Image (spheres, rainbow, N blue to C red):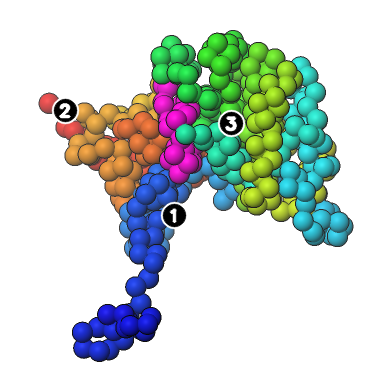
Amino acid sequence: MEGVGGGKRRGDDGAEAAPRWRFSRPSSQGGPLAAAGLTSIRAVVNRVNSSVDAAAAGGPRPVLRLGNGDPTASACYRTAPAAEDAVVDALRSGAHNGYSLTVGVLSARRAIAEYLSRDLPYELSANDIYLTSGCVQAIEVMISVLAQPGSNILLPKPGFPLYESRTTFSNLEVRHFDLIPERGWEVDLEGVQAIADENTVAIVVINPSNPCGSVYSYDHLAKIAETARKLGLLIIADEVYDHLAFGNNPFIPIGVFGKTVPVITLGSISKRWLVPGWRLGWIATCDPNGILKEAKVNQSIENYINISTDPATFVQGAIPQIIANTKEDYFNKILDQLRNAADLCYDKIKDIKGITCPHKPEGSMFVMVKLDLSYLDGFHDDMDFCCRLAKEESVIVLPGSALGLKNWVRITFAIDIPSLVDAFERIKSFCQRHGKLET
């Protein structure tokens, strides 16, 4: 017990008792932080990874990782030499060793504004651009800015789970709208109108799609924009896979419809330039009518960035040269590789009983695959399938339940072709081994 006059706390035997620490329940043990962390792709992939047989992992067959969106482990997915040179030049210049403005280095913001304006019917300026530490921080900023008591946001299902994690952490209510696989994963616009109400602040549109591999047509984007206008919603356009389109539909930024509805575009150099570790992203306000500025959304973004971290200054300093000096030949080469990998992926899936793909991927690096658990014997769900595939075949794919779609899996095809062929041979063997005997 604590002594009179503030003496030390002692037990019944007179010995000094251990302090009674005031942080008795760390947030990791419960609450929104724990819930947000457990739903992240990293947490789910780590769980699947832990199922890999340790002895097999050290054997002659390598672990084939088709579970995340980082293709840089394959030598054929290396960034452009011009991008590497730009970073070296920026670093050696000595001009980018200090802090930057919180909104980002002016020359970088100006270069990104010009880059994005190429595809828009109006011009963006440096004042429309806020640099972030990858697109992940861009998502964090926007969810935090929009998280007001009683508000809700519309997220796609399936979708990118970081949005779910950030909204959970920020106490922003989520309402899901469906993407329709039979229609190329288009947005169910009737469903959007049914779930929106006067407290809905925004709708998230991911195009090209992670996780579906779809690329929306101009007509469908126009319908999304018009629906958002009618409902009075801000569009958050996640375009981190911008220009990674290799099918029938070209990439069109939804900011094209900025005069119809205010759009905030989230992007980065991570995917098109294949440098996710460089952590350089942006928020772009595509709002020629000035609606966001009038609502002080721009000021809220800057306020949040003022209390947040910045991307590395020397990477910011390299951006003008990265954008100006990377040749179209490089981008075309990467698109050809992704197209060939997507074609192979789609053909291999058609040859495996127990899994189906309703829509051939046309963009990003992913394909969604449906599990037929009426044929695959003894699996509880998609997580069980993925963990056992990892254990028996050392192939990592992402459970669809992490993306909001149970009993599906997401496969990343942005790896070298020999490894992709090997992965599908293992998946086919696994499905054959666990398929129910036909009577």
Q: Secondary structure at mark 2?
A: loop
Label 1 Cα neighbours within 10 Å, binned few <14 / some 14-19 / many ≥20:
some
Task: Read off the residue under disc 1.
Answer: 62
Cα distance in 3D space between marks 2 and 3: 45 Å
Task: Read off the residue under disc 2.
Answer: 438
* 380 relative to 67 in the view: left or right: left
Q: Please report the residue visible at 55 percent of the width from the left and 33 percent of the height from the top.
A: 146
Amino acid type at mark 1: Pro
Amino acid type at mark 3: Asp
Cα distance in 3D space between marks 1 and 3: 33 Å
Residue 22 in percent (x, y) is at: 39, 67
Q: Which residues are magenta?
A: 150-179
Which mark is first along the chain, 3 or 2?
3
* 286 relative to 12 in the view: left or right: right
Residue 97 in percent (x, y) is at: 80, 60
Q: Secondary structure at mark 1?
A: loop
Label 3 Cα neighbours within 10 Å, binned few <14 / some 14-19 / many ≥20:
many
Please say whether residue 165 is one of the residues in the magenta stretch: yes
Cα distance in 3D space between marks 2 and 1: 33 Å
Task: Read off the residue under disc 3.
Answer: 238
